Image: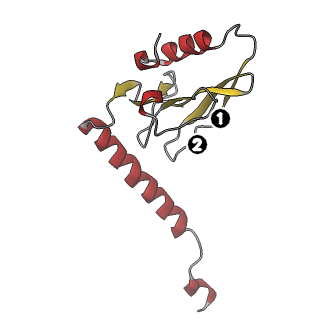
Amino acid sequence: MRKSDIQSMGDIARLILENAADGNNITSSSSATYDKLGQSLRENEFNNNGKGLVMFYTMKPSENENDKLHNAAGPAVIFADSSGNYDPENEANVFYFIYGEKVDPNSKEYKAAESKASSSAMKQSGDIGDTLPGAEEYGF
């Protein structure tokens, strides 16, 4: 399988096994909570002998659905280069998914999701700022 054939989490798993010679030294980590990138995403990573293989972001749409690949503000799947480093700018190693569906980052669908994620993140950061005390609360 080539990296360009990635369509789902199952494809990621197959590629991990193909890239790890014996599979004995594969380790994985996953965020304990859905709190990454301002989109309630979970960050997942697989390594082989401490060297990065793949990092991907998932979200849980509801309590009765499985995680789906997702990142409305960037690549949802980033494969490491031969050195084990992640480069989100390397078009050959990044894949964009919105709610489990692979999308072209230049498509209208992705641009709309990206815009929505961006405005949501800005609104969220504004909400945090609104809770901080202002100068008037200190009598200035």
Label 1 close to label 2 by CB (< 8 Å):
yes
Q: Which amino acid does label 2 sit on?
A: Asp
Q: Is residue 73 above or below residue 23?
A: below
Please tell me whether mark 2 sits on a helix, a strand or a loop: loop
User: Which secondary structure, mark 1?
Assistant: loop
- Judge by depth and name the residue closer to the eye, 74 or 133: 74
Looking at the rendering, which quadrant does residue 33 occupy?
top right
Looking at the image, which is closer to me, 109 or 139? 109
Q: Name the residue under label 2.
A: 35
127 or 116, which lies in front?
116
Q: Where is residue 37 in the image (x, y as percent from the top left)?
A: 52, 45
Q: Point out residue 87 in the picture as x, y percentages from the top left corner.
A: 53, 38
How many labels sit on residues? Answer: 2
Query: Which residue is farthest front?
Result: 82
Check the picture and name the quadrant holding the C terminus: bottom right
Q: Where is residue 4 in the image (x, y as percent from the top left)?
A: 41, 19
For disc 1, the marked residue is: 31
Q: Residues within 10 Å of mark 2 (few under 14, many from 20)?
A: few
- Disc 1 residue type (three-letter): Ser
Q: Residue at x 47, y 28 (%)?
A: 93
Residue at horizontal 60%, vertical 26%? 82
Q: Tell me if 96 is positioned left or right of 139 in this view.
A: left
